[in-house]
Image: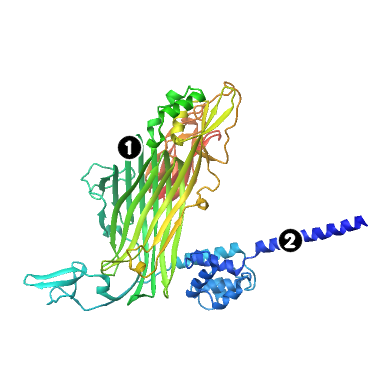
């Protein structure tokens, strides 16, 4: 009887477990319409918070949803509902399910009543957002003026509106000597202003206002770019040497400084600036506006701290205890730090076919470093906003690609304000601080005569410790880095007309979710490893130590223009090898080729050059970016 009872209980318990498991699986597979609408609103920029009710109202204002859709919140997403919302977002015609099938958004085989998995829906959302952000716009310009625009040749009166010297002006006085004028404000010029356009900015047509008094320097050659002296703008600010030049597609900037044994340089290129503009206003009723600017940027940062290079001669033969004592007495890490915000220039470019309308670019660079760093950061940006029937959505699509190594606490950020101006008034803008921030903490592993390891954290920079501890077999150095993408974005600052009408938003992203390499953060010998490998070892003198246990190069990342070359410089090799043992190869020979360490840039793109010993036991990489500028 007891056995039968136990068996029955066992069967019931097993059934309960299966039921719970199936329920959990069903819950995990479920994608409620509530969650879908939240994801759609945030991805499209129509909603910006996690409150589904607020995001739903925003979607409704854009005509994406119906009021009755609230009753569907807890139902699973199917293809009929997905097609309806996405079809309205991209303004597809006719039957939405058929339209999305024809456009390739969803498979032609799916049935409208089939449920949609989250992963599939996210791909459809991403494709739709990309479509609306990359909308093609036809050129249009229409203006209704507050009064007749007169010429200087006519008889004028006070408060008349005149177009002279490339701008609209108001007559302020009439006297025997002629007329006095002031620049007209936007509302004094336009009753309504309607224009649309999409174009690539030609920077050779720009008016440039530098943030420093330019020097006459015909001998200066930029370390990164070979610039013609008559186009190369040079000035000094806060001890930094700043050089920049404009070309058809963008601007190249070089910043450098040498201070307290620290050499630092930052090369920045901004190119392919593509504004997409719609401005439709009448009597302060902004019905349909778009300000979306896409551009590419490349930042190459290099920092070296050569003042510790010879310290290892004093430290290399010390036992680990004496090493730590001497380190604490000799090295002051605070002197390794360098931080600056460097304004570069304002660039004003005319908008085609729209008199007195300009796209303004205000550029500055922010950087901080406390050790050795070398990396190339390539970004693609698309940012701005769109209004529809008094509702706004925010455009923020930024992708990053990082190559190189960081052996320091370092930050490099491109600060840029892109603004739309008409008749002397700033209508709209987008302000971006974007880049990378790394915080590196160093650890010393000190070995005694018995091979026992003692680990201590150090305030001295990782790169300095690497220089000082080289050749000392009783000291090993590790680093742990927190490396983040950095993005602060303001849509419509307080200086704009859109701000005064309530169309503004501030976004700030800087948290653990934006780590560059995810959980891979431990560094040994300048390279990322999954976890620390420093362990206790055999007693002293039973292990031979090589001068370098990996291939050490002078540079691990380079930006080249098409046709440029770069020679790889090998600084150190493991014992038993010479440069004759090295083999070079390119991951993509259509982008860059390599022969005996000489890299040649072929076409725009990125490639990795591998430097490897002929036996395949050791290798290192040089990341190459061939720029479009």
Instruction: Give the image location of residue 135, x and y in percent.
Output: 43, 68
Say whether residue 592 is left or right of residue 191.
Answer: right
Name the side, left or right, on which 149 lies relative to 43: left
Looking at the image, residue 38 sits to the left or right of residue 293; the answer is: right
Q: Residues within 10 Å of mark 1 (few under 14, many from 20)?
A: some
Q: Could you tell me which secondary element the residue under label 2 belongs to? A: helix
**Are circles 1 and 2 on residues that touch, CB within 8 Å?**
no
Residue 175 visible, this orientation:
yes
Q: Which mark is residue 259?
A: 1
Give the residue displayed 30% in from the left and 54% down from the top.
Answer: 247
Single out the residue that lies furthest toward the right: 1
User: Residue 341 in the image: x percent, y percent?
Assistant: 34, 48
- Residue 396 is left or right of residue 163, and the answer is right
Estimate the spatial distance between the alpha carbons at disc 1 and disc 2, rounded to whole Å. 66 Å
Element type at mark 1: strand
Location of residue 134 (image quadrant): bottom left
- Compared to residue 296, the image places residue 105 above or below, namely below
Relative height, residue 514 to residue 425 (above, below): above
Quickly name the residue at label 2: 20
Q: Which mark is residue 50?
A: none
Q: Earlier in the sequence, mark 1 or mark 2?
A: 2
């Amino acid at each position: 009887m007891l056995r039968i009872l136990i068996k029955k209980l066992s069967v019931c318990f097993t059934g309960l477990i299966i039921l719970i498991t199936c329920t959990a699986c069903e819950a995990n597979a479920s994608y409620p319409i509530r969650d879908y609408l939240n994801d759609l609103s945030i991805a499209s920029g129509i909603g910006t918070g996690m409150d589904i009710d607020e995001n739903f109202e925003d979607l409704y204002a854009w005509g994406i949803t119906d009021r009755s859709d609230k009753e569907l919140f807890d139902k699973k997403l199917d293809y009929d509902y997905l097609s309806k919302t996405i079809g309205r977002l991209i303004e597809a015609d006719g039957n939405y399910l058929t339209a999305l099938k024809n456009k390739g958004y969803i498979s032609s085989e799916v049935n409208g009543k089939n449920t949609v998995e989250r992963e599939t829906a996210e791909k459809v959302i991403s494709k739709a957002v990309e479509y609306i952000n990359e909308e093609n716009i036809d050129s249009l310009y229409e203006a209704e003026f507050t009064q007749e625009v007169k010429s200087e040749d006519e008889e004028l009166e006070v408060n008349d509106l005149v177009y002279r010297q490339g701008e609209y002006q108001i007559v302020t006085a009439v006297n025997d000597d002629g007329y006095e004028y002031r620049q007209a404000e936007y509302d004094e010029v336009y009753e309504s202003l309607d224009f649309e356009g999409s174009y690539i900015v030609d920077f050779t047509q720009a008016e440039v206002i530098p943030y420093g008094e330019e020097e006459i320097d015909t001998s200066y050659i930029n370390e990164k770019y070979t610039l013609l002296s008559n186009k190369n703008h040079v000035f000094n600010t806060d001890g930094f040497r700043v050089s920049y030049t404009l070309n058809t597609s963008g601007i190249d900037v070089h910043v450098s400084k040498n201070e307290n044994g620290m050499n630092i340089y930052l090369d920045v290129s901004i190119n392919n600036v593509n504004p997409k503009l719609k401005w439709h206003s009448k009597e302060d009723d902004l019905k349909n506006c778009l300000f979306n600017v896409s551009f590419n940027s490349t930042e190459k940062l290099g920092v070296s701290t050569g003042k510790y290079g010879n310290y290892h001669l004093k430290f290399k033969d010390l036992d680990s205890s004496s090493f730590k004592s001497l380190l604490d007495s000799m090295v002051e890490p605070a002197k390794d730090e360098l931080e600056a915000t460097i304004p570069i220039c304002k660039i004003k470019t005319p908008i085609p076919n729209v008199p007195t309308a300009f796209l303004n670019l205000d550029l500055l660079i922010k950087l901080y470093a406390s050790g050795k760093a070398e990396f190339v950061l390539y970004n693609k940006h698309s940012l701005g906003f769109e209004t529809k029937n008094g509702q706004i959505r925010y455009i923020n699509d930024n992708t990053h690609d990082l190559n190189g190594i960081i052996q320091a606490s370092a930050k490099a950020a491109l600060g840029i304000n892109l603004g739309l101006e008409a008749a002397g008034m700033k209508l709209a803008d987008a302000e971006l601080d974007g880049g990378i921030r790394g915080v590196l903490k160093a650890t010393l592993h000190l070995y005694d005569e018995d091979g026992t390891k003692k680990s201590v954290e150090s305030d001295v920079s990782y790169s300095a410790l690497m220089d000082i501890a080289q050749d000392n077999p009783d000291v090993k150095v590790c680093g742990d880095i927190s490396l983040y993408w950095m993005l602060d974005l303001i849509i419509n600052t307080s200086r704009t007309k859109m701000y005064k009408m309530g169309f503004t938003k501030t976004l700030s992203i800087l948290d653990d979710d934006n780590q560059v390499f995810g959980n891979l953060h431990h560094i040994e010998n300048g390279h990322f490893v999954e976890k620390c490998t420093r362990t206790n070892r055999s007693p002293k003198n039973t292990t031979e130590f090589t001068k370098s246990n990996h291939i050490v190069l002078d540079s691990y990342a380079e930006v080249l223009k098409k046709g440029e070359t770069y020679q790889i410089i090998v600084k150190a090799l493991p014992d038993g090898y010479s440069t004759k043992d090295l083999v070079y190869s390119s991951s993509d020979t259509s982008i860059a080729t390599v022969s005996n360490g000489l890299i040649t840039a072929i076409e725009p793109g990125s490639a990795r050059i591998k430097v490897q010993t002929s036996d395949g036991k050791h290798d290192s990489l040089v990341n190459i970016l061939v720029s479009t500028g």
